[in-house]
Image (cartoon, rainbow, N blue to C red):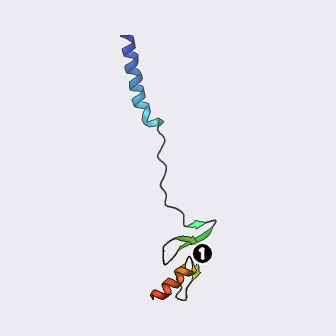
Amino acid sequence: MKYLFVLILCWIAWRLLRPALRKPPPSRAPPSREHDGERMIACAHCGIYAPEREMLRAKNGRCYCSPEHRAAAAEGA
């Protein structure tokens, strides 16, 4: 009988303490649009983000990640 009483007490303590012992879920913050303090810009053709200094600008002011994407956009216009 004593063992059953101790077992029930342990189960109640476990049920009460379980939420306090759980780790909070990791936060799902959106990724930063800055890399080393530099602004990240999306390619107007494929949408990939790259540092502003690596992007190529077209005459219309849009940014592209490569010369091929810039040329493809110029051909489509």
| Residue 12: x %, y % from top left | 38, 25
| Residue 38: x %, y % from top left | 62, 70
From the viewer's perspective, tell me whether residue 20 is left or right of residue 66.
left
- In the figure, 12 relative to 65: above or below? above
- In the figure, 29 relative to 17: above or below? below
Q: List the residue tagged with mark 1.
A: 52
The image quadrant that residue 6 belongs to is top left
From the viewer's perspective, tell me whether residue 43 is left or right of residue 4.
right
Q: SS at mark 1?
A: helix
| Residue 69: x %, y % from top left | 52, 80
From the viewer's perspective, tell me whether residue 37 is left or right of residue 12.
right
Inspect the image, locate mark 1, and give the three-letter code of the amino acid beneath it.
Glu
| Residue 49: x %, y % from top left | 53, 70
Residue at screen point 46% across, 38% down: 22
Residue at screen point 43% across, 36% down: 19
- Quarter of the image with the N terminus is top left
The image quadrant that residue 3 belongs to is top left
Neighbor class of circle 1 (other Cα within 10 Å; few <14, some 14-19, many 20+) is some
Q: Nearer the viewer, residue 27 or 64?
A: 64
